[in-house]
Amino acid sequence: MNQWKSIKKYISRSLSVTENNKSNMPKPISGKVVASFETENKFVSSLATMASNDILVTEDYTLNVYKSGGKQGGLLNDRNDKVYPWNVAVFRFVNEHIAMTCCAMKDGINECVKIYNTRGHLLKSFGQNLIHPRGLAVNSHNQFVVTDSESRNVYIYDADGCLLHSIDHIDYNDEKVFQHPLYVAINNSNYDIIVSDCTAGCVKVFDCDGRYRFTYNGKGTLNPRGVCSDKFGNIFITDWHSDSIHMINSQGLFQRCIVTKNDGIEKPQCLVVNETGNLVVGEYTGHIKTFSYLSKMSSV
């Protein structure tokens, strides 16, 4: 917990830097496709980008690497290892590492979080108490936030994989806060935890201590999947209902739909802002599309 307190102090010191970022933010525009490719398999569940802008994609319970332009760069795991990745995140600990939430198709022994190096060698695993781990996010202090769709909780682990705390509150009706927490992201501006609840039709946001901040439901029509944020604190949400990407600010106020079905997007499942500040969107059907969304791009 001492580690958590020191990180909270760091967050408060960094807020002024974030405010400067916001004041310098270029005007958001409708997304323009700058790159696209089709994945090897269908059923894309998550994606992450590396410093090289290579794209990691979990598709049909495998993890593939795609180079610029969509050329496949290799398979990081196979089912002979009984590893069935559902969500992937990239973080840096001296060198880049890859974290995955893993499903078990039969025996249940691999329902956990696994950490690999970029060559695909397993370094460690944790969270063996998880039932159905799905969403995964990593902050700049290498703390892991994991959603469990079965227990309907969100767990926060430290860099060593030790549980710090969880968001599993019971509301005033003695009901779980989440119905089906699926994807999760950490807001780069304030360390807020952003959770998509597809069954409840909303995104719920909590501060770094797990205190509730706000709910966004797109006026009651949202069918959310993936969530992410950029360095300005903007939050992006995929919406299956309207085949679009909603952009809201860090206070939960709708800004605009950055991408819509008129831009050729269908069943947007997951998304991430890459190293060059573009929005990379994975469609469930196996298409990966990269959009510019700011009038003047700046480095992330």
Image (spheres, rainbow, N blue to C red):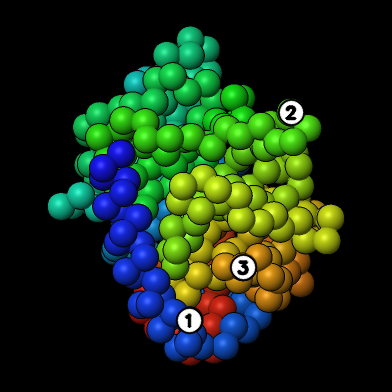
Residue placed under numbered mark 1 in the picture:
22
Question: Can residue 46 be seen?
Answer: no
Of callouts 3 and 2, the N-terminal one: 2
Picture coordinates of residue 205 (x, y %)? 59, 53
Residue that lies at the very extreme toward the top in this rendered image = 107
At x 66%, y 32%, the residue is: 170
Task: Please report contact status of discs 3 and 2: CB closer than 8 Å, yes or no.
Answer: no
Residue placed under numbered mark 2 in the picture:
174
- Which label is found at residue 217? none
Cα gap from disc 3 to disc 1, whole angstroms: 13 Å
Is the residue marked by circle 3 packed among few (<14), some (14-19), or many (20+) residues within 10 Å?
some
Residue placed under numbered mark 3 in the picture:
251
The answer to which image quadrant residue 116 occupies is top left
Tell me how many marks there are: 3
- Look at discs 3 and 1 and give the one toward the viewer: 3
Residue that lies at the very extreme toward the right in this rendered image = 220
Kind of residue at disc 3:
Gln
At x 26%, y 45%, the residue is: 3
